Image (cartoon, grey):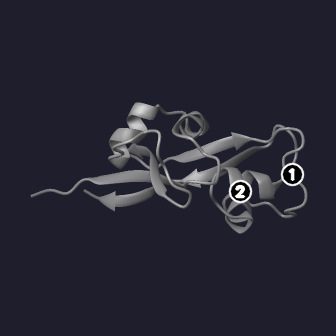
């Protein structure tokens, strides 16, 4: 019997999130989110709920390009992560200094034996 390693990216639902917004954020579809997470009612997700937002046979990162007015705090909140994690993933020397058009890793996949 062989095992297969799948790589999942998770996102924790924030207040005000919708599946449409989450799908757009991670470049996927509502139908795919529903399937990956066995969601019975796509109009009902809960703050704090942990969702699979990407599934792949290979490791993958999710990127975000900094826009004018962005802060690490806002980006961390938007993607359900922490400032500390963004700093670590992106090797940011000064968390108070990010630049417009800077490309940041905002989520990383986690390997799971299937």
Residue 107 position, x and y percent, is: 58, 53
The image's mark for residue 4 is none
Q: Residues within 10 Å of mark 2 (few under 14, many from 20)?
A: some
The picture quadrant where one finds residue 72 is: bottom right
- Give the residue at x 33% y 40%: 35
Q: Earlier in the sequence, mark 1 or mark 2?
A: 2
Residue 12 position, x and y percent, is: 55, 57
On screen, residue 94 above or below 61: below
Q: Split into 4 quadrants, where in the image is the N terminus? A: bottom left
* Residue 61 visible (yes or no): yes
Q: Nearer the viewer, residue 46 or 69?
A: 46
Residue 74 position, x and y percent, is: 78, 53
- Give the residue at x 56% y 41%: 18
On screen, residue 53 above or below 94: above
Q: How many marks?
A: 2
SS at circle 2: helix
Residue bearing mark 2: 76
Direction from residue 40 to residue 51 in the image, left or right: right
Q: Split into 4 quadrants, where in the image is the C terminus? A: bottom left
Q: Residues within 10 Å of mark 1 (few under 14, many from 20)?
A: some
Residue bearing mark 1: 98
| C-alpha span from label 1 to label 2 | 13 Å
On screen, residue 6 above or below 82: above
Q: Are marks 1 and 2 in contact (CB under 8 Å)?
A: no
Instruction: Give the residue furthest to the left.
Output: 1
SS at circle 1: loop
Residue 9 position, x and y percent, is: 48, 52
């Amino acid at each position: 019997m062989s095992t297969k390693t799948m790589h999942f990216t998770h996102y924790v639902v924030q207040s005000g999130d919708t599946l449409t917004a989450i799908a757009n954020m991670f470049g996927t579809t509502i139908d795919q989110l529903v399937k990956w997470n066995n969601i019975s009612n796509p109009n009902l997700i809960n703050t704090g709920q942990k969702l699979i937002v990407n599934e792949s046979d290979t490791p993958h990162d999710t990127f975000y390009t900094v826009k004018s007015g962005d802060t690490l705090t806002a980006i961390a909140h938007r993607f359900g992560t922490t400032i500390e994690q963004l700093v670590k993933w992106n090797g940011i020397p000064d968390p108070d200094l990010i630049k417009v058009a800077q490309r940041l890793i905002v989520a990383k996949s986690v390997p799971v034996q299937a």
